[in-house]
Image (cartoon, helix red, strand yellow):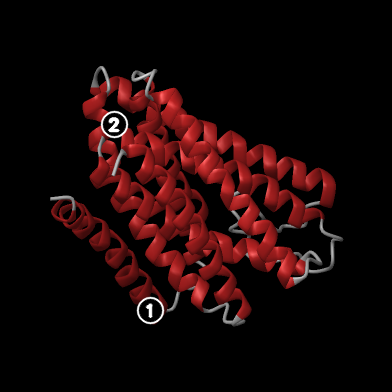
Amino acid sequence: MTPLAWIVVMSISGGLLSVLVAAALSWAARPTWVPTLISYAIGALLGAAFLEVLPHAIEAAESPERAAMNILAGILIFFVLEKLVLWRHCHDEGCHGHRHDHHGHGQAAAPEHDHGRSGLLILIGDTFHNFVDGVLIAAAFVESTPLGIVTAMAIIAHEIPQEAGDFLILLHSGYSRGKALAFNLLSSLATLVGGILAYFALSHMETLVPVFLALAAASMIYVAVADLIPGLHKRTELRATAQQVLLIAAGIASIVLAHPLAERALG
């Protein structure tokens, strides 16, 4: 398949898979599954960032120092974006020591009905985030097909617990199950839009590929370290910690195995 075909297939299938699996988990009313998925997602994100995307970003950049600067700039950008969403949420809702973020990893839903306001904020933030995911997938496939597959797998792995969190927040904001599913599916189409637009832009602007690869690494590292890992520290018992470590290791291992499997499948 061509890079464009891969981008379309992975954007559509990844978006549908993450939303439908997240909806199924939320529908099953088993919130204990979400922390398990998050632990695995952390490993997949960190494995993809450090073992796959970062080496390609450094190789494609003018120098290792330039790649490092792009990654640091990306982390700062994601920090500022998250702050803007949090400030908007605090302005609209009032903050009482409770946190939601643009990745959908709020630690719990709002304690009382908010007439859909936090749900709308989640949808807007998620749509933007999905668009960025599409751009990152396109940048990875332009670099190489195996890297694109690994990047898409890491994004899907972290989208499932994200979408599960989003779905639960939408339900708590007063959305029906059907509307919550429909809006999440509509939001996931932003991945395809971002991927296609980025492909046609990147094909004429090759110098942007290293920048987007650096942003991909920054996004994965920021989401894992700033948004997901702090939630794991809320469970301090030895059994939970051991489970988290094993699942993070499993996430990393899946990325280690994914690259040679992708290359073998591609012949």
Q: Residue at x 51, y 71 (%)?
A: 34
> Picture coordinates of residue 193 (x, y %)?
54, 39
**Mark 1 / mark 2, whichever is N-terminal:** 2
Labels 1, 2: front one: 2
For mark 2, what is the residue?
57
Q: What residue type is labelled 2?
A: Ala
Q: Do the residues labelled 1 and 2 touch (CB within 8 Å)?
A: no
Quick one: 245 or 184, which is closer to the camera?
A: 184
Residue at image mark 1 = 238
Relative image position of residue 225 (x, y in whole percent): 44, 50
Residue 108 seen by the camera? no
To which quarter of the image does residue 40 belong? bottom left
- Name the kind of residue labelled 1 in the image: Leu
Residue at image position (87%, 61%) is 115
Residue 136 vs 256, above or below: the answer is above
Residue drawn at (39%, 58%), measured in percent from left and top? 42
Q: Distance between the residues labelled 1 and 2?
A: 37 Å
The N terminus: image quadrant: top left
**Is 60 on the left or on the right of 155, as rendered?**
left
Q: Where residue 194 appears, x then y in whole percent? A: 52, 37
Give whichever of 87, 113 is nearer the camera: 113
* Rendered position, 112 above or below 152: below
